[in-house]
Amino acid sequence: RDNFPKYVVSLDEFDMSRNGIKHRNIRDFLLAEEWN
């Protein structure tokens, strides 16, 4: 395993994050002022 964050970006409105992989809605992701 490495220390880089993992993201899945999709059109789904609900959060399906698990096992250290962060799920983000594409609209929220692109409009966010800061990435977390």
Image (cartoon, rainbow, N blue to C red):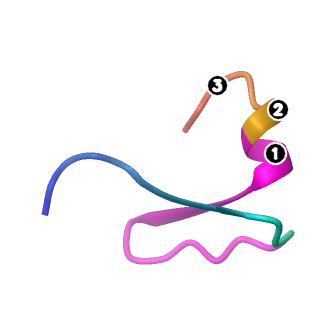
Residue 27 inside the magenta-drawn segment: yes
Residue 7 inside the magenta-drawn segment: no
Mark 1: secondary structure: helix
Mark 3: secondary structure: loop
Residue 20: image quadrant is bottom left
Q: Are marks 2 and 1 in contact (CB under 8 Å)?
A: yes
Give the x, y percent position of residue 23: 61, 64
Mark 1 Cα-neighbour bin, 10 Å: few <14, some 14–19, many ≥20: few
Q: Are marks 2 and 3 in contact (CB under 8 Å)?
A: no
Residue 11: image quadrant is bottom right
Q: Which residues are magenta?
A: 14-29
Q: Amino acid at mark 3?
A: Glu
Mark 2 Cα-neighbour bin, 10 Å: few <14, some 14–19, many ≥20: few
Q: What residue is drawn where x is 75% and y is 31%?
A: 32
**Residue sitting at the far top:** 33
Q: Amino acid at mark 1?
A: Asp
Q: What residue is drawn where x is 38% and y is 76%?
A: 19
The residue that label 3 is drawn on is 34
Q: What residue is drawn where x is 85% and y is 47%?
A: 27
Q: CA distance from mark 2 to mark 1?
A: 5 Å
Q: Are marks 3 and 1 in contact (CB under 8 Å)?
A: no
Any mark on residue 31, and which? 2
Any mark on residue 7, and which? none
The residue that label 1 is drawn on is 28
Q: What residue is drawn where x is 72% and y is 43%?
A: 29
The N terminus: image quadrant: bottom left
Query: Which numbered mark, 2 or 3, is in the foreground of this view?
Result: 2
